[in-house]
Image (cartoon, rainbow, N blue to C red):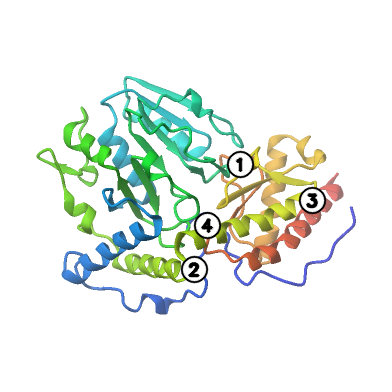
Amino acid sequence: MAQISKPDTRPANPRFSSGPCAKRPGWSLEALEDAALGRSHRAKIGKSKLAQAIDETREILNVPADYRIGIVPASDTGAVEMAMWSLLGQRGTDVVAWESFGAGWVTDAVKQLKLTDVRTFEAPYGEIVDFAEVDFDRDVVFTWNGTTSGVKMPNGDAIPADRQGLTICDATSAAFAQDLPFDKLDVVTFSWQKVMGGEAAHGMLILSPRAVERLESYKPAWPLPKIFRMTKNGKLIEGIFKGETINTPSMLCVEDYLDALAWGKSIGGLDALKARANANLKVVEDFVAANDWIGFLAKRPEIRSNTSVCLTFTDPDLVAQPEDAQNAFAKGVASLLEKEGVALDIGAYRDAPAGLRIWCGATVEASDLEALMPWLAWAYETQKGELKKAA
């Protein structure tokens, strides 16, 4: 293999982490100057900012007016577990997984909640479960976009409008970058740290009227921690969905999320945010099409994520190597890129197949991805050259 020189152009922003993700273009600490620091989140100013975050989330995501939106503890994980612990158990449950976070919801249902009537459907990395096998007259828990596999739902067509069960959807890597059919979704969760480039530890919980009805008519057999409780005396605690959070939020993080939402609105809202992510994915797609040594982990284009883009090395010489050798090669490539300061945090998730994971959400600039692509080739060839020297 011929030695290639380092590319001349470097990404202006080398941050391609899948969470926390890159801040919006032009972000600086000055964006946080109006934060309500040193003030109670229950004071008028605190409540107004939290309510504004909810209202602008509804506006950009086109959330129906009769759906509740709440800011909850513990990021997307907290939001999903609030929903699972509070809603499941009334009827049978189907839990669907095709990557590590979805597998975590399987564990919650089977080993933690120990539901008596639960079915699990799992697909390997790169594939997606056949939703024709899922019974939507049962409650269904699934991930819309697999952050660690780069595999997403192609659409919501498999979900019937006349379903009897609730759909609980972890949409943390999809919200603000992909279409979410709210008429097919009863619970939607996400965190600020993904597509909008916000800070961690705060989750968003969106509930349909059907989910609210379940909350008010069903009491789980297990005890609920305080931070999971959304009802009192059989009625929804409406304040949660008006900015009266269960526990104390970071008003600095709230200000940062408001800044991200303002940026999203300024560029054209949801359509513009989706277009940016799609354009970013196209840069990677063009590169993969031009190089036969790299491919997408997602097996088919229709299930390929436009945010958490996962790549594998398809070079036959590498594919023939043991798994630990493939992992070492991929880590070596990621390490070279980080040492050069051109790509930070793009190694594959620890439970995923060997490869790279490049965040392509809306806060990432296509020009930075265009600058990165030649560096991928340089790092690949450099790492392969090291293997040949060691052979």
Disc 3: which residue: 291
- Residue 59 coordinates in the image, percent (x, y): 35, 60
Q: Earlier in the sequence, mark 2 or mark 1?
A: 2
* Label 3 or label 4, whichever comes before in sequence order: 4
The residue most toward the top is: 116
Does 9 sit above or below residue 145? below
First in residue order: circle 1 vs circle 4 = 4
Would you name the residue on which mark 1 appears?
A: 302
* SS for callout 3: loop
Report helix, strand or loop for mark 2: loop
* 346 vs 83, nearest the viewer: 83
**In the image, 61: left or right of 214?**
right
Q: Which mark is residue 14?
A: none
Quote the CA–CA distance across marks 2 and 1: 27 Å
Q: Nearer the viewer, mark 3 or mark 4?
A: 4
Q: Measuring 46% from the left and 31% from the top, which residue is drawn there?
A: 96
Residue to which mark 2 is pinned = 24
- Residue tagged 4: 274
